[in-house]
Image (cartoon, rainbow, N blue to C red):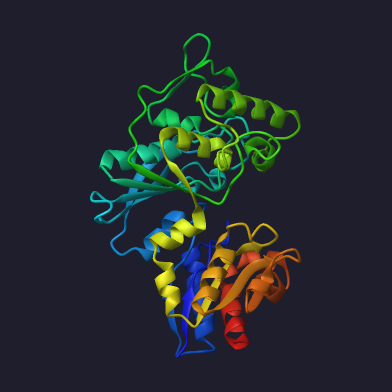
Amino acid sequence: MTTVVLAPDSFKGTIAAADAAASLADGWASVDAAATFVHRPMADGGEGTVAAFEAAVPGAERMPIVVDGPAGAQIETSWLLLPATPESPAGTGVIDLASTSGIELLDGLRPWDADTTGFGQAIAAALDHGVSRLVVGIGSSASTDGGTGMLAALGARFLDASGAPVVRGARGLADIESVDLSGLRTPPEVRVLTDVTNPLTGPRGAAAVFGPQKGLDGDDITRADAALERLAALLALDPALPGAGAAGGTGAALVVWGATLAPGAAEVAALIGIADAIAGADVVITGEGSYDGQSGDGKVPSFIAGLAAAAGAAPLLAAGRITADSDAELFAASVSLTEIAGSSDAALTDPARWLREAGAVLARSV
């Protein structure tokens, strides 16, 4: 009897990690009906982080809230309450920026006006509940506001020359003359999940590297970078700090608040006990939407492949696409949904179907 651990990341914007795992299991079972499946959907701090914890931790409870989304309009979302443990006697709150201030929540890019207020409001809701610990994922950001929206929702004040609060988003950064952190809420233990090691500013900073994804270009990038540099000075933060540029500078803001940045995939894996699951496995299937040259840099598939290899299990990969510059040789077998579906459009239209096909292909391969 084959024991198969299913540990994919979400296929961004198309299918959640838990649903991807279920489809892969269905496909494998169509070939190997006697197989035993262990579902451990993964995340690295971006889209699907809350869902990954919900699927893996018994007793996890969704806590519905309404927050200001990245465009300012109110949205219904939730944070996740994990049960109390000796290390966290009042429970742990899990919050992802993607579901509160994420780019997928926008109808159109808002490079100067999107902000992280909703993320801060969700954190405040978990604090109001009294959690002992927070785990926050900061992937899929919509903004380059330096985390000012988040900090403002937690009690900080960002003031212009007249002493009035600046406008939200990157638009207000250049107008900040003073910062008042006296009302900032006291953090519990806070772990920040991110796969980004970029500094806050400079050629590898938040504006230069991630700004274009959010609508910044040309002179906009230069202006935003200068504003973030000024913000770092006002907050007495080293802008070269690795990870400070994550989520448009939200990594920097969280460090100022007292949080600790941690590699997303490794932290999620530890918290959901994936190493123990893999220890008894014959096969481990992981995946993501695009397995490319960046996927080896702390992303879910490469991390899971390492765990599987160390445990003597065969690592397998299913991805929406697999590019020539990727390190697919890490896997005993791999399959691209684009190839088996015939086109990327077909794969994107019905990812569950093609993940089932991929599961069957991988079962036959071993």
What percent of the width, then of the height, locates residue 355?
58, 73
Which one is nearer the viewer's eye here, 177 or 312? 312
**Residue 178 visible at all:** yes
**Measured along the vertical axis of the image, is residue 28 above or below residue 104?**
below
Which one is nearer the viewer's eye here, 138 or 119? 138
**What is the count of numbered marks?**
0
Give left or right: position of 310 versus 348. Answer: left
**Measured along the vertical axis of the image, is residue 53 above or below residue 245?**
below
Which one is nearer the viewer's eye here, 358 or 132? 132
Q: Quadrant of the C terminus?
A: bottom right
The residue at 55%/38% (across/down) is: 244
What percent of the width, then of the height, locates residue 80?
35, 52
Q: Quadrant of the N terminus?
A: bottom left
Q: Quadrant of residue 332?
A: bottom right
Name the outermost residue toward the top. 162
Give left or right: position of 193 versus 331. Answer: left
The residue at 55%/64% (across/down) is: 303
The residue at 56%/38% (across/down) is: 241
What percent of the width, then of the height, locates residue 357?
60, 79
**Residue 70 visible at all:** no
What percent of the width, then of the height, locates residue 252?
52, 36
The residue at 64%/61% (across/down) is: 296
Give left or right: position of 324 versus 93. Answer: right
Q: Quadrant of residue 85?
A: bottom left
